[in-house]
């Protein structure tokens, strides 16, 4: 059976005109989704927006997309925002060749001249500025679609010719449903969804978890412009209202002041105990939004959508949330278990390379703590995201289930971190956390060898793997300064330095019996070029 041909793209790119022509040439039925929604609801699109709001429109649109995705041999023109929602991408891509019709913002303005006032999404005092903003926000979602045809300066017939050439070679783009992993905690359990476009299941799982109130999407200034519209579209497709709150990217936003500002915004916007806080971002956003969820009205439901690798494999699991005090990181915090975690590996496509490597350092840490196969995968280079993330999370899950409030075993998660925190302090936080962890893991393995806990070969193996992943294994800091900084670590117990050391892959211990001179001797190998 012939797959559908699904034409999408921003308003004014000619989806309907081109779709009609293409359908005629191929002698296929043509479906215009907006017209179909109007037929079903008995309202024009502007009326639907005005009377029932955008969420109702998106909900209706998702129902139409789900149905069309079951049919074959159609030419479909979608709405401009349809493919923002992962659930619509999944429905229409499973059995359809999805093509974006693209045009420059200038060409779109030109084409929409005269009708710009009638577009509900452009309503407001400055429709042109609104159009450019909307266009920019949707760009990231369109960029991820498998095919595109440029329409600027071309006639519809010309565009149809290019489509006719493209279609015979193109294939549908089905996505597998996400894997689901359940985490136990003292108050219950929560699912973690892991997979490419796992966001497609967000709405259904929100309903399953009975999270039916308005959603506050908290994100940062890097992630929100790339992904917030898409998450919002998926919530709307499930009939859930959401608003986006953006904080500046970076650790500087993890403060009590920022939490207080967010509390204020939620209050102004009428959020109550039935509402949900959804963290969309890296560990900074997860910790901050989680703290807000834990404290607003004594706690409201919380959903984690980690977008950095570090947040997926580490920060989003285990329930630790909090903000920094000017004098100590993570000092003000709580345990707040999420109701749902969605690790959508699609987000990793926009993650900067350096951040991705930093996340890999934590994956190596998890492998050393409890998953030898993780290290083997990384060493072989033959691994895929969902599986790597699932196995890395599995290590953390096992530990937090055993020790939910960090009273004992959970300390092993600090492998490499006593060294890492000291390096971060000495570098004045110029050294990113993940890179500091990489160096810290090497130092921990060397120390284990020195005190006779582990083989020399273990340190060599860890070092070789981290190098392979593009992570540092040395750092040009004064060893004595690092030693001093280690003395201030809050993990120190009754005056003795508490360290986590590996005995073998999958076997780490917590000890406070390591003599100072051994730690110092290992720190002497810290600098590049030092005997290691
Ligand atoms: N709660 C816990 O158990 C736990 C565990 C480990 C770390 N943490 C905390 O996590 C934080 C570090 O997390 P992080 O490394 O994710 O830092 P982060 O949140 O600052 O993210 C790193 C950078 O990547 C950007 N980014 C994230 N996802 C992106 C995407 N998909 N596309 C483009 N850019 C993206 C962010 O905007 C930021 O600039 C620290 O504050 C740390 O204390 C918490
Ligand atoms: Zn860490």
Image (cartoon, helix red, strand yellow):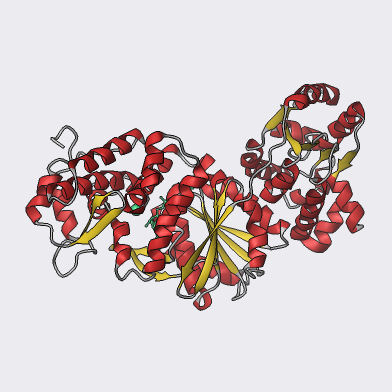
Residue reaching furthest to the bottom: 298
Q: Vertically, is 129 above or below 289?
A: above
* Residue 155, above or below 185: above
Pick the quarter of the image with the C terminus: top left
Residue 82 is left or right of residue 358, and the answer is right
Confirm whether residue 254 shows in the render.
no
Q: Quadrant of residue 457?
A: top left
Q: Residue at x 24, y 59 (%)?
A: 509
Residue 154 x/y as whole percent: 79, 23
In front here: 10 or 491? Answer: 491
Q: Is residue 350 left or right of residue 418?
A: right
Q: Is residue 235 left or right of residue 370?
A: right
The image quarter containing residue 254 is bottom left
Q: Is residue 285 visible?
A: yes
Of 70 and 425, which appears nearest the observer? 70
Q: Position of residue 14 (x, y in %)?
A: 81, 34
Spot occupied by residue 65 in the image (x, y as percentages of width and height): 79, 49
The image shows residue 477 at horizontal and vertical percentages of 18, 42
Task: Give the quadrant of the N terminus.
Answer: top right
Question: Along the horizontal axis of the image, is 290 left or right of 346?
Answer: left
Q: Is residue 504 above or below residue 146?
A: below
Q: Residue at x 67, y 33 (%)?
A: 146
């Amino acid at each position: 059976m012939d797959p559908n041909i699904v034409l999408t793209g921003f308003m004014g790119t000619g989806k309907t005109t081109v779709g009609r022509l293409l359908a005629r040439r191929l002698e296929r039925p043509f479906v215009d989704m907006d017209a179909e929604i109007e037929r079903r609801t008995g309202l024009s699109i502007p009326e639907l927006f005005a009377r029932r709001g955008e969420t109702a429109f998106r909900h209706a649109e998702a129902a139409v997309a789900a149905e069309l995705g079951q049919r074959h041999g159609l030419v479909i023109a979608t709405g401009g925002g349809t493919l923002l929602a992962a659930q619509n991408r999944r429905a229409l891509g499973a059995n359809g060749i999805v093509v974006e019709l693209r045009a420059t913002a200038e060409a779109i303005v030109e084409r929409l001249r005269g009708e710009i006032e009638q577009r509900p999404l452009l309503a407001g005092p400055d429709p042109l500025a609104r159009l450019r903003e909307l266009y920019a926000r949707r760009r990231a979602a369109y960029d991820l679609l498998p095919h595109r045809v440029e329409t600027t300066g071309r006639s519809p017939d010309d565009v149809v010719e290019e489509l006719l050439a493209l279609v015979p070679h193109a294939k549908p783009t089905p996505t597998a449903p996400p894997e689901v992993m359940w985490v136990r905690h003292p108050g219950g359990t929560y699912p973690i969804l892991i997979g490419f476009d796992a966001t497609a299941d967000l709405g259904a799982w929100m309903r399953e978890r009975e999270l039916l109130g308005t959603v506050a999407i908290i994100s940062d200034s890097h992630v929100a412009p790339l992904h917030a519209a898409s998450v919002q579209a998926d919530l709307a497709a499930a009939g859930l209202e959401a608003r986006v709150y953006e904080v500046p990217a970076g650790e500087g936003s993890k403060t009590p002041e920022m939490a207080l500002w967010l509390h204020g915004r939620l209050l102004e916007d009428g959020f109550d105990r039935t509402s949900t806080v959804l963290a969309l971002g890296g560990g900074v956003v997860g910790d901050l939004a989680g703290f807000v969820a834990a404290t607003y009205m004594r706690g409201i439901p919380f959903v984690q959508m980690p977008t950095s690798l570090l947040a997926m494999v580490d920060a989003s699991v285990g329930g630790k949330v909090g903000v920094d005090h000017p004098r100590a990181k993570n000092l003000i915090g709580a345990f707040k278990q999420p109701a749902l975690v969605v690790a959508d590996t699609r987000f990793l496509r926009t993650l900067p390379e350096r951040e991705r490597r930093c996340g890999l350092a934590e994956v190596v840490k998890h492998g050393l703590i409890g998953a030898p196969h993780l290290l083997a995968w990384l060493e072989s280079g033959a691994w895929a995201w969902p599986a790597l993330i699932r196995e890395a999370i599995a290590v953390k899950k096992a530990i937090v289930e055993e020790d939910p409030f960090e009273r004992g075993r959970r300390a092993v998660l600090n492998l490499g971190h006593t060294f890492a925190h000291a390096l971060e302090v000495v570098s004045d936080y110029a050294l990113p956390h993940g890179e500091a962890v990489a160096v810290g893991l090497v130092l921990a393995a060397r120390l284990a060898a020195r005190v006779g806990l582990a083989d020399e070969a273990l340190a060599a193996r860890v070092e070789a793997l981290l190098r392979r992943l593009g992570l540092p294994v040395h750092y040009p800091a004064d060893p004595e300064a690092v030693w001093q900084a280690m003395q201030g670590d809050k993990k120190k117990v009754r005056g003795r330095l508490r360290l986590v050391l590996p005995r073998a892959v999958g076997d780490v211990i917590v000890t406070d019996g390591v003599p100072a001179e051994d730690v110092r001797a290992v720190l002497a190998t810290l600098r590049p070029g030092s005997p290691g």
